[in-house]
Image (cartoon, coloured by chain):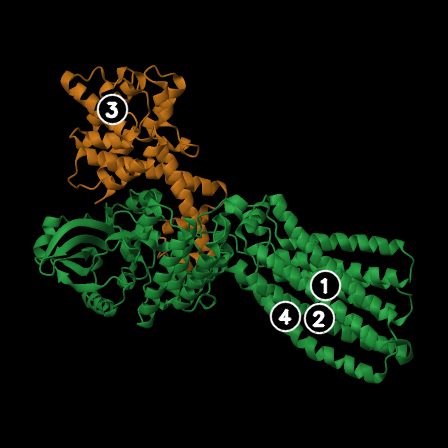
Amino acid sequence: MNEPSSRHAGFAPTRWSLVLAAGKHADAPARAALAELCAAYWYPLYAYVRRRGHDADAAADLTQGFFARLIERNDFAAADRERGRFRAYLLAALRHFLADERDRATAEKRGGGAAPLSLDFERADSKWHQEPAVDETPERAYERGFAHELLDRALGRVERDYGARGEARAFAVLVRTLTAPGDAPYRELAAELATSEGAVKVAAHRLRERWRAALREEVAALVDDPADVDDELESLFRALSG
Amino acid sequence: MTTRTCHRCGTAFEPTRSPHGLCPKCLIGVGMRDADEVAPAPQGVAPTLASIAPAFPELDLVELIGQGGMGFVFRARHRELERDVALKLLAREHAVEPSFAERFRREARTLARLSHPGIVAIFDSGERGGWFYLVMEFVDGANLRHLMQSSRVEPKQALSIVSQVCAALQYSHDQGVVHRDVKPENVLVDREGRVKIADFGLARLADRDRGALALTGSQQVMGTLHYMAPEQWEHPQAVDHRADIYALGVVFYELLTGEMPLGRFDAPSKRVEIDVRLDEVVLKALAKQPERRYQQASHVQTDVDTIARSAAGERAPAPPPAASAPSPTLATGAWLAVALVATVLVCTSVALWHVARIHFADDVPERNGWWGAALGLGLGGLVAGITAHARLQRREDYARAYAARGLNWLDGAWALLACGGGVGLACAALSKPNHPATETLWLVSNLCLLVGALTWLLRRLAGWNAARRERAHAPRQPTPPLDAAQDPGARTATGDGRLFLFSLVFFVGVSLLCDALTRAVSWFAFASEAAGDGLESIALFVPMPVLFGLPGVLAGWHLLRLGSRTDGAWSRPKLSGFDAVIALFGISAAFHLVTATQLEPGTFPWWSVLTQGVLRAALTAACTWRRWSWWPRVAPLA
């Protein structure tokens, strides 16, 4: 969780709907919001570009160029259909951008001058090399990467929340029960936290509730219509299916 | 770079990449809609009809009709027999242990032995094409979950369903088969309203396969979680048929109210308009400790059937409640009027008794006649009051009007008694001292105050208290019944009544001991002339109270301590049995001390009453101290 986004993540998530509401002629706050969202979810885009066969330098250039155009002009009309959901919109816009770039085959315009975001491509490259060398489509890599970023952000928020209340240790211990509530070794966890088994079960349940709330909040920030949260979660769930 | 396979969902993931090394897919699963209620798609994708058809040549597969954590269910038609059947395939990934096949066969044989109209019959089972399968009776209808989602289940219908489920469960329990996974999804209702329970014992298969609950994936576990009895959480292998009764209780509650009995839940009659007697049935089925639950499904059925019959008998001619529903004011007035009449009758009887005692001190037959009349009047007043209130309570419209105000008749009674007692005491203080009428007034007022205080205590403690009102307005937390402190259901129904009883036993015991002590002390201090008591009366009055008081004290104290200390089910979040004892002692100490001020200083009764008052005040203080030092606390985390 050392992504550029982490310094914002403790607060309520930036809302994609804010950007949408601002429309084409985005004002400064909307632009800042878009920049922040991009900064949070740029790695999946980078991974997508890499999967498309670009090398590290080209991918870094393209990603940065894409953000420059997105944040400055935000004119990917072709992606408008997907506007309701940030994840889908981002990918559609990137595809559109890559197609444009190929047509022009010119690199000099990329970035349009100063880079709008400071992105750590070196780290991204090493992260990329840690990815499994499985045969997967660029789209899939993007979806999976996106899901991971989202989970990182949401869990980071919950963790900082616990930390702020001086319960970092409880979090570190209980987080293991998040995905395995039924058969978690509550007795051992209770011993580790020097409390009763019942109290651990209750605390684990609360953590689960908090996690659920944080995750849904994070996803709600990325869709225009709150009713889409479940759909979006389901898409991510499918994206992660083996 | 290492990858790991999640043992719940079977997805490969990289622990180094995913947050805290947790399976990302399961993490998202937690946040998904209804993750806690409905089991979403299991691992893997349903096989196509074409892919499994070759393995089942005798069946015409029609469609996939359901899928859950355990596998997939298809509707099919048996070619030879020309009847519809359901084909259940158990997902292959479940069968990882070599012993699974053997156990599956054993379970199937057990299931095949169950032959009951309320249980889905098994026709065939085995292993084909890599699937473990069961061919079952096809039920043309819907499961309870769908039924509840599509329309509201009427209370009458709910009673009929629960009764049928009870019959089927009792049959299977008699055969030694525990379902272990009773939930709305497993209760099927056909078009004629007949109930059939599916998936008997399959949960056990799942449980054993990989420890407690791992097999069916986190979502499935979550879906089933709320129907699991507390002991099923703690000792999944040592569960008996009473776990099914708990799950039945959850289903029953859900059927009646449309909600799950989670966290601080209301009695069903507080959520919907139903017979209040059903509360007791539901709460008893939902008792946390198996030994406090119904011990047999048939007992639930008997109670449900009794209520259903009496409801059918009583309700049919009754006018619709909306038309005749009284306003809350009228209803409250009725309650208060009944309480007033009963109180006046009882007070008059006490006054009569006292006046007769003074006036006919020398004429014993006359006095006894008056005493009989007083007793009759008092008892008559009590019985009439309680009966009238019970009748009102049974009328739903009145009960509802009270619930709307958060009142019940005990409120009226204690308020009246307290007011009457206060006014009486004030009048007695202003009246001529030592006049028989003043004395009578004094006695009656004190009695009113004491009974009023006891009534208030009863109201607070006996599960009829304002906490219900609070609960109705409190935010409902979807907390599974994990911890005693979080599960007030059983507590309100039985625990508090018992605590009150223990408190009384303890109080009476201590009072008897106090009495014996005071008598002994007064005898030594004032000698027999002043006390009017001889040695023979001491010999009678001291050992007897000790004989009866001591066991009461010991038993009461032990139970109170046990209740306050170890078993959360016996204590409310804010009240414990000690509060009852403290209040009782406090009231009696005040009573004795106030009475002592009315007596001639230096005489025997003055001395005795003062001693009693001081003793009781000391006991109040001691109990208060013990109460705080034994107050149960949940250890805070980290």
Residue type, mark 1 in image: Phe
In the shown orientation, is residue B534 left or right of residue B202?
right
The residue that appears at 40% across and 56% down in the rendered structure is B252
Give the numbered dot on residue B585.
1
Task: Please name whichever residue, B502 or A171, is drawn nearer the observer in this view of the structure.
Answer: B502
Using the rendered image, report if marks 2 and 4 lie on a common chain. yes
Mark 1 and mark 2 in contact? Answer it, CB < 8 Å.
Answer: yes
Name the chain letter of the residue that bears numbered label 2: B
Which badge, 2 or 4, is on the more N-terminal residue?
A: 2
Q: Residues within 10 Å of mark 2 (few under 14, many from 20)?
A: many
Which chain, by letter, is orange?
Answer: A
Amino acid under disc 3 = Arg
Number of marks in picture: 4
Task: Answer whether labels 1 and 4 touch (C-beta < 8 Å).
Answer: no
Q: Position of residue B153 (x, y in %)?
A: 38, 50
Q: Residues within 10 Å of mark 1 (few under 14, many from 20)?
A: many
**Chain letter of disc 3?**
A
Q: Tell me the element at label 3.
A: helix
Tell me the SS state at disc 1: helix
Task: Kindly identify the amino acid type of the residue bearing the numbered disc 2.
Answer: Val
Per the model, the C-alpha gap separating discs 3 and 2 is 81 Å
Q: Which residue is mark 3?
A: A81
Farthest residue in the front direction? B317
To which residue does mark 2 refer? Answer: B510
Task: Tell me the CA gap for discs 3 and 1.
Answer: 76 Å
Residue contact at pointers 3 and 4, CB within 8 angstroms: no
- The image position of residue A134, as x and y in percent, is 17, 41
Q: Are the numbered discs 3 and 1 placed on the same chain, yes or no?
A: no
Spatial distance from mark 3 to mark 4, Cα to Cα? 74 Å
- Circle 4 residue: B556
Q: Real-space Cα distance between discs 1 and 4?
A: 14 Å
Q: Quadrant of the N terminus of chain A?
A: top left
